[in-house]
């Protein structure tokens, strides 16, 4: 931590008229959270699936073998597609024959096959002090034994305050949606975030004097985001700046 503070101090003091009055280190309380979500993959419907759907629309089909015989296609291929279409709720068995659902009708008309939903999850760091998600969980997090941020108790917020749009923007920033040619993978549902554990992220704070402007201000380096944190700087300047 001392090496990091020294490096940051040298960076700041390279600026003319800047003098560091005081510095400190502390831990920003954050929550490691998990966001479960569901994606749907859309692809151009292949010709065999279209033929199966059209056949079901026009004929009484009691089992996949009927279509295999009618189309002169290997029964295993037809059974596999039937299983996919049932899982995607495109067809259903009603009495003694299959019929298209509204989903199946819409997909046949559009020519786009929506694959069955797939569940996934991603881990992020949420900061009550920012009331926002700071970043996706990195491979390595900087750790050090430091005291808690002196303003931490003023922000007893919960990640449950995050709305759907914030969660969606967070996920989209990690490129969970993909469009490549005829393939499209989109987020369909986002579930309630779950807290996994509490952590303290080391931050380095400087109280700085600008001789040219005769003014004081705060700089805070956030080791999680690896950048100067303007939100924390403003909080400290407004409520609890370091003073000699």
Image (cartoon, helix red, strand yellow):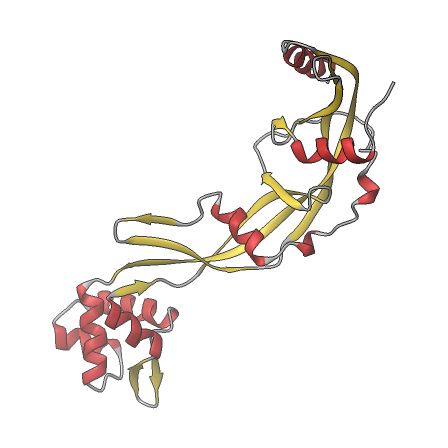
Q: Position of residue 39 (x, y in %)?
A: 44, 57
In the foreground, 244 or 184: 244
Residue furthest to the bottom: 95
- In the rendered image, the quadrant that contains the N terminus is top right
Residue at screen point 61% across, 27% down = 227
Q: Position of residue 152 (x, y in %)?
A: 80, 39
Residue 74 shown left or right of residue 199 in the figure: left
Residue 158 shown left or right of residue 106 in the figure: right
Residue 237 sits in quarter: top right
Q: Position of residue 211 (x, y in %)?
A: 73, 12
Residue at screen point 29% across, 70% down = 107
Residue at screen point 75% across, 50% down = 157
Q: Is residue 21 above or below residue 30?
A: above
In the foreground, 83 or 180: 180
Residue furthest to the right: 244
Q: Is residue 128 above or below residue 64?
A: above
Q: Position of residue 20 (x, y in %)?
A: 75, 14
Residue furthest to the left: 72
Residue 162 shown left or right of residue 165 in the figure: right
Residue 103 sits in quarter: bottom left
- In the rendered image, the quadrant that contains the C terminus is top right
Residue at screen point 23% across, 80% down = 56
Residue 171 shown left or right of residue 25 in the figure: left
Q: Is residue 101 above or below residue 240?
A: below
Residue 16 sits in quarter: top right
- Total of numbered circles in the picture? 0
């Amino acid at each position: 931590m001392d090496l990091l503070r020294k490096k940051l101090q040298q960076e700041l003091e390279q600026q003319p008229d800047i003098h560091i009055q005081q510095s400190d280190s502390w831990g920003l309380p954050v929550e490691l959270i998990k966001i479960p979500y569901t994606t749907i993959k859309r692809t151009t419907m292949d010709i065999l699936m279209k033929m199966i759907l059209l056949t079901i629309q026009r004929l009484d089909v009691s089992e996949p073998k009927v279509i295999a015989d009618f189309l002169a296609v290997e029964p295993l291929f037809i059974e596999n597609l039937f299983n996919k279409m049932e899982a995607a709720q495109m067809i259903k068995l009603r009495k003694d024959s299959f019929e298209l659902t509204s989903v199946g009708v819409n997909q046949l008309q559009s020519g786009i096959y929506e694959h069955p939903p797939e569940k996934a999850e991603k881990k992020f760091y949420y900061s009550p002090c920012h009331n926002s998600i700071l970043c996706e969980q990195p491979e390595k997090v900087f750790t050090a034994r430091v005291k808690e941020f002196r303003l931490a108790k003023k922000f007893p917020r919960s990640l449950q305050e995050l709305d759907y749009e914030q969660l969606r923007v967070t996920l989209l920033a990690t490129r969970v949606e993909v469009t490549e040619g005829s393939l499209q993978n989109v987020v369909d549902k986002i579930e309630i975030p779950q807290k996994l554990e509490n952590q303290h992220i080391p931050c380095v704070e400087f109280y700085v004097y600008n001789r040219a402007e005769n003014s004081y201000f705060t700089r805070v380096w956030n080791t999680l985001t690896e950048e100067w944190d303007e939100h924390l700087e403003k909080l400290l300047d407004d409520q609890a700046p370091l003073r000699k």
